[in-house]
Amino acid sequence: MNVAKTGYRVFSANSSAACTELAKKITERLGVELGKSVVFQESNRVETRVDVKESVRGQNIFIIQTIPRDVNTAIMELLIMAYALKTSCAKNIIGVIPYFPYSKQCKMRKRGSIVCKLLASMLAKAGLTHIITMDLHQKEIQGFFSFPVDNLRASPFLIQYIQEEIPDYRNAIIVAKSPAAAKRAQSYAERLRLGLAVIHGEAQCAESDMADGRHSPPCVRNTTGHTGLELPLMMAKEKPPITVVGDVGGRIAIIVDDIIDDVGDFVAAAEILKERGAYKIYIMATHGLLSADAPRLIEESAIDVVVVTNTVPHEVQKLQCPKIKTVDVSMILAEAIRRIHNGESMAYLFRNITVDD
C-alpha cells in the first residue's frame, strides 16, 4: 500500500443545510473535522465569494458540492473554491460531486452544444485534479475530462433497500420504463434473481423537429450537367402504442433509473403497470431532482414509494410528499476519499458492479 505523505482536508463548497449535512456525515465517517471556509453571496446578490480560513499548502483537498435547485450558483461556488485552493498551493484538489450537473446535455442535439464537455473543461481550468461522482447519466462523460474520474455506483445501496425494506420482494419484477433503461434494469434483475419487464412506446409525443432548415431541399442551379442532390428517402419514425413486454400481473413492480426529475414518464408507466395487474409500484433512482410539481404528481399517482439517495438535496420535496424515501450513500463517498488519499485501489468499491449499472 502506497500511503500518502501529505495531509488532507475536507471542505464544503456551500453553506446550505443539505451540503453541510452530507459533508458532516462524510467527515464523521473519516474521523476528521470539516475544513473552515465561508461561501456567501455579496450584498448585490449576484457575485459569489469564497474565503478559506486555514492553510492548505501541500495537502490533498476534497471539496464536497451537492447541486441544489440553483445549479449555476453551485457550479460557480465550486469553481471559485477550487481556484482559491489552487492559488493557495494545495497539492491536489478533488471534487466530490455526487450528482454531476448538466449530465443530460452530454450529446449534440440539433444546433445546441455539449454543455457537459464545457463544464468538464471549466473544472480543469479552475484547478481540479480529480473528481468523485456517482452514476453519471452516460458513462462516456468520463471521456470529457483531462483528469481521473471515479464514477461510483448507488446500485448496492438501492438493492439493499429492496431486500430489507420491501416485504415479499421475491414476488417483485424489475421494470425498465423504456428500452434505453433495459440494461440497467437487467443488471438489477440478475443480482436480485428476479424477472424483467420493459415498457415499450411513449405516452407523450416525441420532441418535434423545428423548422430549422435541415428539411429544406437543396438549391437547384441552372448549371449544365448538374442534376441536383438526391438523397435516399427515409421513413419518418413513428412511436408505437405503449406495451409491456413481460408479465407484471399480481407482482410488485420496481422501476429503476438513474435520475428522476420530470416525473411524467414515471407516472404514465405506473398507470400502465397498474392496468396490467401490478399491485404495488416502487421507483428506485440514484438522483432525486424532483423539480417543479414532481412531489404533488407523485402523491396523486399510482406510485406507492419513490426511493432516491442523498446525492441531491430533496428535503423540501419529502415534506410535500411522504412517499419519497432516502438512502444514505455517504459511506461509499467517505471510503472513496480515504482510498484516494492513501493511494489505495478503488477496485473494492466496484466489486460485483457491471458497466450497465
Image (spheres, helix red, strand yellow):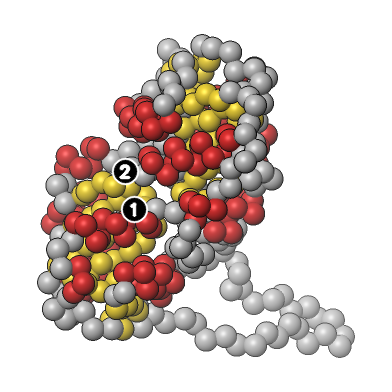
Q: What residue sits 52% from the left and 24% below the top?
A: 9
Residue 88 place in picture, x, y as percent? 64, 17
As rendered, which of 66 and 71 lies closer to the eye?
66
Residue 310 place in picture, x, y as percent? 33, 42
Is residue 344 left or right of 319 when viewed as pictured? right
Q: Which of pointers 1 and 2 lies earlier in the amino acid sequence?
A: 1
Residue 197 place in picture, x, y as percent? 31, 78
Q: Which mark is residue 121?
A: none
SS under mark 2: loop
As rendered, which of 43 and 60 lies closer to the eye?
60
SS under mark 1: helix
Q: What residue sits 65% from the left and 38% below the top?
A: 2
Residue 227 visible in the current orientation? yes
> Can you say whether 181 is above or below 243 in the image?
above
Mark 1 Cα-neighbour bin, 10 Å: few <14, some 14–19, many ≥20: some
As rendered, which of 342 and 152 lies closer to the eye?
342
Q: Which mark is residue 328?
A: 2
Is residue 220 left or right of 243 when viewed as pictured? right
Q: What residue sits 87% from the left and 85% below the top?
A: 224
> Can you say whether 285 is above or below 223 in the image?
above
Mark 2 Cα-neighbour bin, 10 Å: few <14, some 14–19, many ≥20: some
Looking at the rendering, in which quadrant would you find the C terminus?
Answer: bottom left
| Residue tagged 1 | 157
Q: Amino acid at mark 2?
A: Asp
Looking at the rendering, in which quadrant would you find the N terminus?
Answer: top right
Is residue 200 left or right of 127 when viewed as pictured? left
Res 219 → quadrant: bottom right
Res 333 → quadrant: top left
Tell me, yes or no, whether the two marked residues, 1 and 2, touch with CB atoms within 8 Å.
yes
Q: Amino acid at mark 1?
A: Phe
Residue 14 visible in the current orientation? no
